[in-house]
Amino acid sequence: MGNHILLHSVLGSLNLSVKLILIIVPLMISYEFLENSKIFKKILNFLYLFIKPMGFSKNASISMLTGIFLGITYGSGILIAQSSKNRITKLDAALTAIFLSMCHAVIEDTLIFVAIGGNGAYMLITRIIIATLITYILYKYMSSKISQR
């Protein structure tokens, strides 16, 4: 009986690992090709239309795009690199960290949860709405504190 449970657990874990690999690897490869293309800049410009009302500068688009689609690790890596080169403001860095802490790897996470039976549309829409609202509220709060100085 104990061996059956162990075998079932191992097979279940292997099955989930294969699903994760089939989702994550193609996303990473696609990003690597996309990153050096002309369409990448168009995507960043398009994304900026949505992040501008939340207080982001145009330079924050790349870390937001990366974090939203590939995950917080990649997004924060780009965020740190941009910050150290002074390509983004402290406000951009703070807002990006706030947004990505709630809404990162939206494609990857959604596909993973769909693979195990979750409702992808509900999860995706909820995460985006909550992250947007909280980031906007904190942007208004932080910008009012900055203007009071």
Image: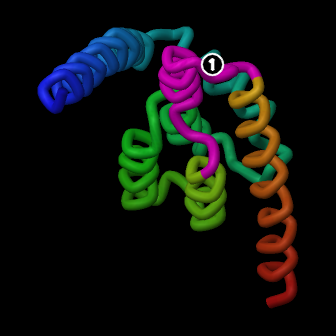
| Residue farthest to the bottom, as pictured | 149
User: Is residue 108 inside the magenta stretch?
Assistant: yes
Q: Is residue 6 above or below residue 130?
A: above
> Is residue 135 or residue 103 the one in the foreground?
103
The residue positioned 86% from the left and 66% from the top of the image is 140
Note whether 136 is above or below 64 in the view shown: below
Can you give x and y, in whole percent of width and height, for residue 144 in the image? 87, 76
Q: Nearer the viewer, residue 119 or 146?
A: 119
Residue for point 65% across, 50% down: 99
* Left or right of residue 59, residue 5 in this image: left
Q: Is residue 91 magenta?
A: no
Q: Which residue is mark 1?
A: 43
Q: Quadrant of residue 61?
A: top right
**Numbered disc 1: secondary structure:** helix
Expressed as whole percent of the image width and height from the top left, the position of residue 138 reads 78, 66
Prevailing secondary structure class for the magenta stretch in the rendered image? helix
Residue 43's place in the image compared with 126, above or below, is above
Q: Amino acid at mark 1?
A: Ile
**Furthest residue toward front:** 1
Q: Report x, y in % for residue 73.
A: 38, 45
Numbered range of the magenta stretch: 102-121
* Quarter the C terminus occupies: bottom right
